[in-house]
Amino acid sequence: MKLKNAFYRTILFCLSIGAALVLGCSILTTIHYDVDGELQVDWPHYRKENIPLLLLSLAVVLLIFLLLKKKNVFKEYKKLAIASIGVITAYCLMLILFIKPLPVNDSKTLDDIIQSFVRGDYSSLTTKGEYLYIWPFQLGYVLFGEWVTNIFGAGNYLAWDLLQLVSIIITVWLIYKITWECFEDAEICGMVALLSTGALFFYNYVTYIYGDILSMAPQTAALYMMILFIKRNKISYGFWSGVFISFAIMLKTNCEIALIALIMMLFIGGSKKAVRSKIVIAVFMLLAVFVVKEGVNTHYCKVTGLAEIPKGSPSVSHIAMGLQESDLEDGWYNGYNYHVFSENDYDTDKTKTAAIENIKGTLTDFAKRPLHGGKFFVRKYLTQWADSVCISTHNLDLVSRHVQEPTALGTSLVYGNGSEIIKWIMNVFMTLCYLGVLIYLFTTLKKKKVTDSEMLMLILIFGGIVFHEFWEGSSRYAMRYYIYYLPFAACGLKVLSERIFLYKLK
């Protein structure tokens, strides 16, 4: 128990430092992206924050929270949840119908591959140097894409966007459910419902057809089921968690971080007497993930005639790239993982050796210049986690560039006044969210008490932070963890509002 508590406090302490850095950065600076430029890669730029306007906006939002708390509106959390889902749905539909987004970059490449596979052309996988030969981990998403195409037809991007909308709604609704299981407090649930309407960075990705959003619903379902197992010790919840996380990993391999968090909490949390059940669930989870992966690979070996699926570019090439300084942004995508594979004649083992040597060189340099290395990691952390829009506005720009008949509202949302409004909402939301998160973390550290349900979510967030300090950097990746901060931000805002009311009474 002492070891468990020490582990929990370490996670809370590290997250507190991270949250304080993001909160400070979000008050002093903001990150933006070039609009309508020739460069299509993600390149974040820092600029000074309008601090007086930000603080005024924050004060207005906090005042609204205080007034709603005073009138006990948050206690009607179920009505607030339904209303918030309605607002979120309306916002997403507005983006879909008025921007009329089209696939771009990797999304477009994968869409073309899916259409080729449906026609029986598998050259992207079987030809040396082609996309899936290099990145075979995308095969699960491609298989899902074939199912979608066979059901809704080729090039039916509206159907894809609506599927992503469904995934967003399910994810947010499950976050409401998780909030109740973590805190069992009606006011916190009401606050998280209202707070969720400001998470526009997440909803903007309804326009970006890729595995990020589609994988969020099954991943969040897996987390919710694990929380139910931890609290109720009913083995069926553990099995369902395994089913959902295996499907999430099929769509997006980054969900393996959630798998690690689930298995960790499976053994750390819950009843000590349920050891046998926990072992069975852990084995089932790992087996489910293995079966899904092997099932996908076996299917494509069968239809292509390949003896085995190409190994592709090794994972260490992503880590090597994630540790590199760059002309664009340190640790972000610079093409290294693609070029090093090509330079080594698409030989996975040779590429792995080259990437490991590159990593050793980088770490040796950081060891010789520790302050420089420390600056690199802090900057990389902030470019990912202190980006209030999580690249979503840049993606709105990209997906709207090739629309044949753009609408006036769609143009405004991407390039005009509408864009400025939604960027400011996300800017204020980040400050408000991390203020609440920091209060929650400090309060929890002080009282030295945290539930296993809370820790599952916090360990996942912490794992995402650590993983992407070394992996390819991108605030699009941080987005999938940032959204899970909502329950903790709401808890912190409740603590803040109660202290304000207590101060007034005194």
Image (cartoon, rainbow, N blue to C red):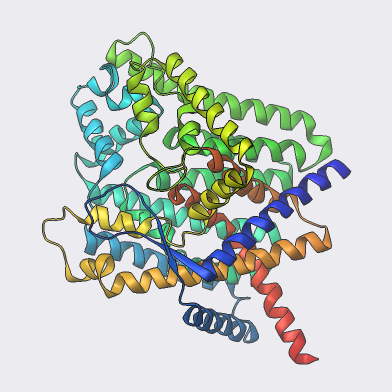
Q: In this orientation, does residue 1 appear?
A: no
User: Quarter of the image holding residue 409?
Assistant: bottom left
Left or right position of 315 against 162: right
Q: Residue at x 40, y 19 (%)?
A: 297
Q: Where's residue 380, x and y in %?
A: 51, 49
From the image, which quarter does the N terminus lie in?
Answer: top right
User: In the rendered image of this protein, does residue 59 appear above or below residue 31?
Assistant: below
User: In the rendered image of this protein, does residue 247 appear above or below residue 59?
Assistant: above
User: In the rendered image of this protein, does residue 211 appear above or below residue 424?
Assistant: above
Nearest the eye: 449 or 75: 449
Q: Where's residue 267, x and y in %?
A: 75, 36
Q: Residue at x 47, y 64 (%)?
A: 199
Q: Where's residue 286, x and y in %?
A: 59, 26
Nearest the eye: 95 or 385: 385
Q: Residue at x 43, y 43 (%)?
A: 332
User: In the rendered image of this protein, does residue 127 appear above or below residue 398?
Assistant: above
Left or right position of 396 against 386: left
Q: Residue at x 39, y 12 (%)?
A: 308
